[in-house]
Image (cartoon, helix red, strand yellow):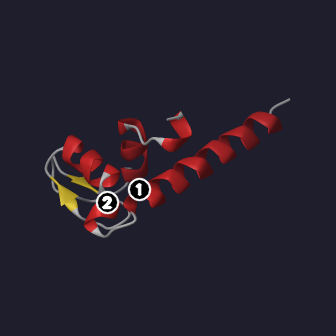
Amino acid sequence: ASSRDSITTQDILTASKGQLVAQHSYQCVSCCHIFPKLGALKTHIQNSSQEGYSCKVYYLRLKALWEKEHKMQEAAVP
């Protein structure tokens, strides 16, 4: 799978910036569930469709938007 089709730990952490959750917890930005470990959140995102959620779609779309924004910023720099 290309990097565009996968969600990395860094993608999850970037999306979670500014989220107010208990210390040492991670919140899914899509469905707002809270997980005790980052690995558990990543597993949730990867398997979200099996659980009845669309979190993976959300994170993939968010990542695509970040990449588009980054390319636009690079193009704007002379």
Q: Is residue 32 above or below residue 4?
A: below
Residue 38: image location, x then y, percent: 23, 43
- Look at the numbered discs 2 and 1 and tell me whether their residues touch, using CB distance below 8 Å: yes
Q: Residue at x 53, y 54 (%)?
A: 62
Residue furthest to the top in view is: 78
Circle 1 residues within 10 Å: few <14, some 14–19, many ≥20: many
Residue 51: image location, x then y, percent: 26, 65
* Helix, strand or loop under label 2: helix
Q: Is residue 25 left or right of residue 78?
A: left
Location of residue 77 (image quadrant): top right
Q: Quadrant of the C terminus?
A: top right
* Residue receiving disc 2: 48
Sooner in the amino-acid sequence: mark 2 or mark 1? 2
* Residue receiving disc 1: 56
Residue furthest to the right in view is: 78
* Helix, strand or loop under label 1: helix
Q: Is residue 73 left or right of residue 24?
A: right
